[in-house]
Amino acid sequence: MPTKKLLNKGKAKKTIFSVLASIFDLMLLQLSIQNYIIIESLCFTPEANLNIITGETGAGKSIILGALNLILGARADVQSFRKPEHKCIIEAHFDVKNNDNFQQLLLDESLDQEPICIIRREITTNGKSRAFINDTPVTLAVLQKLTNDLVDLHQQFGHLALRDDHFQLDVVDAIAANHVLLKNYRTAYKNYKTLKRKLEDAQAQQEKLQQEADYKQYLLVELEHAAFKKEEIESTETQLKKLANAAQILSILSAAKYTLEEGEQPMINELKKISQQLQSIETVLPEITPQLKRLLTIYEELKDVSYELKDIESKISIEPEMLEQLQERLDLGYKLFKKHGVTTTQAILDIQDELSNELLQSHHLSEDIQTWEKELKLCYDEVVQLANSLSEARQKAIPGIDSKINELLKLVGMPNAQFKIALQSISNPELHGMDQLEFLLDANKSQVFSPVHKAASGGEMSRIMLCIKSLTAQAMQMPTLIFDEVDTGISGEAAKQVGILLKDLAQYHQVICITHQPQVAAKSDAHFFVYKEEQNQSIMAKMKLLNPEEHIYAIAQMIDGEKPSNTAIQNAKELALH
């Protein structure tokens, strides 16, 4: 097929794949690199599906991944500068508008939520590094946490994921289509955990209340026994002062009464006489009338005062027993004031009510705990039942998953490898169920299975991850997937199958792959070529997106060397076609 016709077919496929990628995943839109090792300035703009990067060994392909690692939170090295006098800047743009999990992570870190997330690393000439997410400074720890949801670089992800029990369970659940079971389980599990925390908090509160209950009960009994009424202590204090000074009060009241009514010249009588005398001259001296009226008013007032003094005097008595009782009552009140740090009767009564309520609350809490314990038992039983259903579904799916992965491993150049999944029950419910799962590998038919991350080499690990991801491509949300020379150590049919798997995976996720294999490069939706160029007596790494003719020629070079034959070019066309 002519190259142009092949291009048109590729464009048609690319349009479909771009739609699928936009539905299923986020993407790396752009990576720009300035002043990093042999890169002066480079801008990498991958497409939505399968992006292949090729180039001679040492041309700078891995340098680009090294720069991307800085975006992912790797430690910076000032010796990596191309020009030590200028700072190094790495910036990446990601389309995250459909990634709810990442948007929540931004919210959790109080970062701006934007449809395009811009991440930037700046390394100054003195070795200081700064990281920014949407122009807000962040720590490397935050950067590493967030970028886990943006880029899956097999050098870190392959090893970590294959050690991660949760990732392995996610893989099995995705392939087994356990999403409904898992959703139901997690709903029940979250209810169980919420109720369990509620019960534990209540039990802790009850324990604290019980530790204080005896003392509070003692305080309450003491206050109830005292039985003070509203404002009683203040009233008692006033009464006691009266009784304590009763003799003096009676003496003064008696003297006042004597002066007003009794004495040799009682004041009231004298006023009466004066008033009578003035009345006798009022007819001949009318101007005396106002003074007369005032005297008569004073006379009446003094009579009233005298009467009231008698009344007060009658109510005051010297009673030693009453004095002793009031003093005891007041002493008790002052003792309680000091004990509780208050100064009023009302404060004492408030403390009494508070103690009563707290002890009543403790009683109610005990009843609530008994109710919640029964509810928790029912909730736990439901969780266990759903966990068992989930375990059965996983156990049922595992043989088929083992078989499919083993078939794929043979295709990608691992014919002697045997993969299997070991599933074991655990005693306590967790977010992913009540199972512990591990991916195992026998690399050489030795019948000895070890954890994959221990049994497989780096290249084998990448191919195993590729096989796993190809099985979960439609079911699991994954970030941009990057494979660095996933085809190391293979060729021919195995390399072709790796290319097919990458192509299939790229229907649902953005994939970036560095390769030396023409069979893999031929499957690209976008082919980027990295090369060195001498400029101003200095070697710099460059990158360009190949057009269809350049794409075919680059594949032919991978087959036949720098100057490929017509046969190699024809082979390249056939590889790109199939």
Image (cartoon, rainbow, N blue to C red):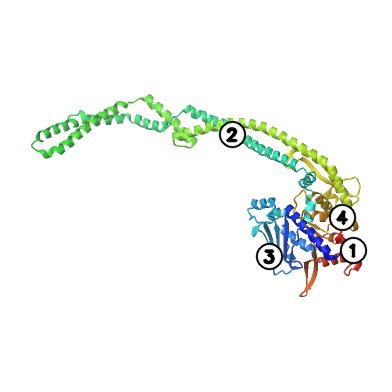
- Residue at the spot of label 3: 124
Q: Quadrant of the N terminus?
A: bottom right
- Residue at the spot of label 4: 497
| Alpha carbons under labels 4 and 3: distance apart | 44 Å
Q: How far across and down, in percent of the image, does residue 229 sit? A: 43, 29
State the image quarter where residue 394 is shown. Answer: top right
Q: Residue at x 85, y 67 (%)?
A: 553
Q: Quadrant of the C terminus?
A: bottom right
As drawn, the label of residue 209 is 2
Q: Earlier in the sequence, mark 3 or mark 2?
A: 3
| Alpha carbons under labels 3 and 2: distance apart | 58 Å
Q: What's the residue type where badge 2 is placed? A: Leu
As drawn, the label of residue 571 is 1
Q: Earlier in the sequence, mark 1 or mark 2?
A: 2
| Alpha carbons under labels 3 and 1: distance apart | 48 Å
State the image quarter where residue 191 is shown. Answer: top right
Closest to the camera, between mark 3 and mark 2, is: 3
As drawn, 321 above or below 436:
above
Are there few (<14), some (14-19), or many (20+) residues within 10 Å of tag 3? some
